[in-house]
Image (cartoon, rainbow, N blue to C red):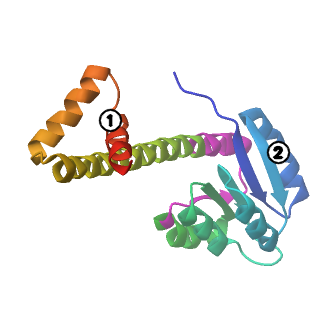
């Protein structure tokens, strides 16, 4: 069963009619936080304040086309970026941004196409969310390995154990007490400090 998320959105668009139409669609899609800005300068400030799940840029904007901003946001973090560009510029801009992970749509965009695009964006965001969790899990595992290794070396130096004996000692104590190796390693290091 897929977990449902309330997505946050930064909408960068100077078109009031487009914004009204898209806001209704975003609410129906389950987007909880929607911040709308009408220029790239404001968009840069908003994206510096927080990370949005989706960033939708409706080009052109009064102060910039928005292409560089879209690439920067996409490569800097975990936001999924959709760039809406005029049909005659679509192929050229898509060629510039696709390698950076930015989605593009040629305007005008129909509501069904926008719904499909939001679905794609949600899929990518969920994949990024899983990758974030996996990265944190790997970092935690590496921290545990470093801690256990420090405890092993402490046992080798303080108790005269071999590396194999120190490893077995930590493993056995963790299994006997039904606790993680990290807990035993922390106890060993704390005992040696005192």
Residue at left 68%, top 39%? 112
In this view, 139 is above or below 176: below
Can you identify the residue that label 2 sits on? 23
The part of the image, by quadrant, that contains residue 47 is: bottom right
* Mark 1 or 2, nearer chain start: 2
Horizontal side of residue 193 vs 16, given as left or right: left
Residue at 70% over, 71% down: 66
Q: Is residue 192 depicted above or below 29 in this figure?
A: below
In the image, farthest residue toward the right:
16
Determine whether label 1 and label 2 are within 8 Å by CB: no
Name the one closer to the observer, 6 or 87.
6
Observer-nearest residue: 4 or 116? 4
Side of 66 where 135 appears, left or right:
left
Q: Position of residue 33 (x, y in %)?
A: 78, 44
Q: Where is residue 176, by image quadrant?
A: top left
Image side of residue 113 versus residue 37, left or right: left
Secondary structure under tag 1 reads helix
In the picture, the disc for residue 184 is 1
Question: For residue 192: magenta?
Answer: no
Residue range of the region highlighted in magenta in the rendering: 100-120
Q: CA distance from mark 1 to mark 2?
A: 53 Å
Residue 142 in the image, given as x and y percentages of width and height:
33, 49
Q: Nearer the viewer, residue 68 or 193?
A: 193
* Secondary element type, mark 2: helix
Q: Is residue 113 magenta?
A: yes
Please state the horizontal and vertical placement of residue 29, each as a whole percent of the image. 72, 35
């Amino acid at each position: 069963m897929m977990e449902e998320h309330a997505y946050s959105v930064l909408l960068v668009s100077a078109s009031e009619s487009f914004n009204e139409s898209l806001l209704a669609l975003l609410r129906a899609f389950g987007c909880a936080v929607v911040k709308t800005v009408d220029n790239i300068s404001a968009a840069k400030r908003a994206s510096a304040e927080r990370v949005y799940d989706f960033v939708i840029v409706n080009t052109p904007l009064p102060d910039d086309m928005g292409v560089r901003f879209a690439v920067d946001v996409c490569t800097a973090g975990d936001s999924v970026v959709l760039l809406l560009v005029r049909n005659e510029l679509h192929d050229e801009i898509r060629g510039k941004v696709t390698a950076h992970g930015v989605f593009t749509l040629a305007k005008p965009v129909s509501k069904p196409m926008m719904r499909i695009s939001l679905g794609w964006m949600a899929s990518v965001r969920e994949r990024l969310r899983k990758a974030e969790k996996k990265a944190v899990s790997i970092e935690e595992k590496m921290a545990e390995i470093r801690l256990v290794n420090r405890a092993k070396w402490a046992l080798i130096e303080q108790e005269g154990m071999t590396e194999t004996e120190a490893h077995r000692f930590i493993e056995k104590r963790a299994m006997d007490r039904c606790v993680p190796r990290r807990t035993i390693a922390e106890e060993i290091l704390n005992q040696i400090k005192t």
